[in-house]
């Protein structure tokens, strides 16, 4: 009896295991269908918009750099560097004479900095120092105390410290070697914030989101992503560059958490079909959505090359009747580039096909700019051309 019961037990367990395995496979398939695949071209909202109030403020100041190795400004009559040096020494209780102000170890500079948002008193920021006079180099110099002013004329930071210069200049009698820009430098953590820019998130009832690249479709997608995350219609685009967001009741008094939650949402931005051309450098940048209708293109330039190889004709030796003359020899070559053929671009070609077709014609960047403008004039290029 034991021998007959054992096989029955095994037979009864096998269908149950197969049913469990089949059910588990179906569940895995449903989960794979429900969970969407990550979009390759999606970007975070924090990379597409700027939040109202979260911005930098530009600061500027005028100061003096001392300790230069005879590479500073020339202290001539009427020089602003000389006047600034006299004023500074007078405030320190020193009365210099005219003969004593002949040093070339001082340079007048402009000091600039960017005050980050929500910077508190005592925090440090980097500053940039640029020569204002005829100084040769700021290497080895030290910036004296320089107040940094905002757009309202108030002092928001004070800068001072050793100037770090990346370039150098070496000059001799017959030649000069210069690397980089020796008249410009930086001071890491060279300014101390003395005044704060007041702004509070806590009491805000509505937040404005400004798109860095205004677009109607992108603004709508951002609003839809925020509303889907919050579960209510709290965000609404007012124009292609602005989205208004009403702070939900659950985030009242804690707007930082709201911004932290929505800035991580991913949205696929929409791009305008645009071609950017820099004629000075010959750089061409094409967007992904550039399309071309059916058009035939032929490119060819007439090249004429003239070569002068003059020869000298001299008389025979001991010949008194002849004279030495120069005989011109001119060679003219005309290249009509007859091997250039007519190329056809079909309707709706992609960006890669457009580039491959233009490259097949053997054109350079300069000729490519002219071809793109000609295609646009023919009405076959469905994109905006922006010339820098």
Image: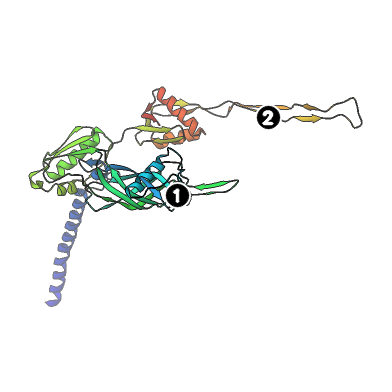
Mark 2 to mark 1 CA distance (whole Å) = 56 Å
Measuring from the top left, give residue 358's x and y in whole percent.
Answer: 47, 33
Q: Secondary structure beneath disc 1?
A: loop
Of residues 214 and 135, the one nearer the viewer is 135
Q: Is residue 12 above or below residue 125?
A: below
- Badge 1 density bin: few <14, some 14–19, many ≥20, Cα 10 Å: some
Q: Is residue 306 left or right of residue 186?
A: right
What is the number of the mark on residue 307? 2
What residue sits right under mark 1 in the picture?
105
Q: Which quadrant of the figure contains the C terminus?
A: top left
- Residue at image location 15% in from the left, 43% down from the top: 228
Of residues 119 and 15, the one nearer the viewer is 119
Of residues 336 and 153, the one nearer the viewer is 153
Farthest-out residue, bottom? 2
Farthest-out residue, top? 378
Measuring from the top left, give residue 118's x and y in whole percent.
Answer: 21, 48
- Badge 2 density bin: few <14, some 14–19, many ≥20, Cα 10 Å: few
- Residue at image location 49% in from the left, 31% down from the top: 366
Q: Which quadrant of the figure contains the N terminus?
A: bottom left
Q: Is residue 253 left or right of residue 242?
A: left
For the residues labelled 2 and 1, say whether their Cβ atoms are less than 8 Å apart.
Answer: no
- Residue at image location 20% in from the left, 49% down from the top: 35
What is the number of the mark on residue 200? none
- Residue at image location 22% in from the left, 51% down from the top: 121
- Nearer the N terminus, badge 2 or badge 1? 1
Dot in front, 2 or 1: 1
Of residues 178 and 91, the one nearer the viewer is 91
């Amino acid at each position: 009896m034991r021998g007959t019961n054992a096989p029955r037990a095994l037979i009864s367990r096998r269908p149950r295991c197969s049913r469990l395995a089949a059910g588990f496979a179906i569940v895995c398939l449903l989960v794979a269908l429900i969970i969407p695949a990550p979009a390759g071209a999606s970007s975070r909202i924090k990379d597409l918009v700027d939040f109202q109030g979260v911005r930098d403020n530009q600061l500027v100041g005028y100061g003096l750099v001392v300790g230069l190795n005879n590479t500073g400004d020339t202290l001539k009559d009427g020089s602003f560097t000389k006047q600034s040096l006299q004023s500074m020494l007078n405030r320190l209780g020193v009365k210099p004479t005219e003969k004593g102000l002949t040093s070339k170890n001082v340079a007048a500079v402009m000091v600039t900095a960017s005050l980050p948002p929500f910077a508190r008193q005592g925090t440090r920021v980097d500053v940039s120092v640029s020569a204002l006079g005829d100084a040769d180099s700021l290497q080895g110099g030290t910036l004296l105390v320089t107040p940094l002013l905002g757009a309202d004329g108030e002092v928001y930071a004070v800068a001072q410290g050793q100037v770090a210069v990346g370039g150098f200049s070496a000059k001799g009698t017959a030649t000069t070697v210069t690397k980089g820009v020796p008249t410009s430098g930086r001071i890491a953590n060279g300014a101390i914030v003395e005044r704060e820019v007041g702004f509070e998130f806590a009491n805000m009832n509505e937040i404005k989101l400004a798109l860095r690249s205004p677009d109607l479709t992108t603004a709508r997608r951002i609003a839809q992503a925020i509303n889907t995350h919050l579960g209510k219609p709290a965000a609404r685009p007012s124009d292609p560059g602005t989205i208004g967001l009403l702070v939900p009741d659950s985030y009242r008094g804690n707007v930082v958490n709201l911004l932290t939650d929505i800035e991580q949402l991913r949205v696929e931005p929409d791009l305008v079909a645009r071609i950017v051309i820099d004629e000075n450098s010959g750089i061409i940048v094409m967007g992904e959505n550039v399309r071309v209708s059916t058009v035939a293109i032929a490119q060819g330039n007439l090249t004429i090359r003239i070569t002068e190889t003059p020869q000298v004709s001299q008389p025979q030796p001991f010949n008194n009747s002849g004279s030495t003359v120069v005989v011109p020899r001119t060679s003219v070559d005309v290249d009509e580039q007859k091997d250039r053929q007519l190329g056809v671009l079909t309707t709706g070609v992609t960006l890669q096909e457009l580039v491959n077709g233009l490259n097949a014609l053997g054109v350079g960047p300069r000729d490519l700019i002219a071809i793109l403008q000609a295609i646009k004039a023919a009405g076959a290029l469905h994109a905006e051309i922006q010339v820098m």
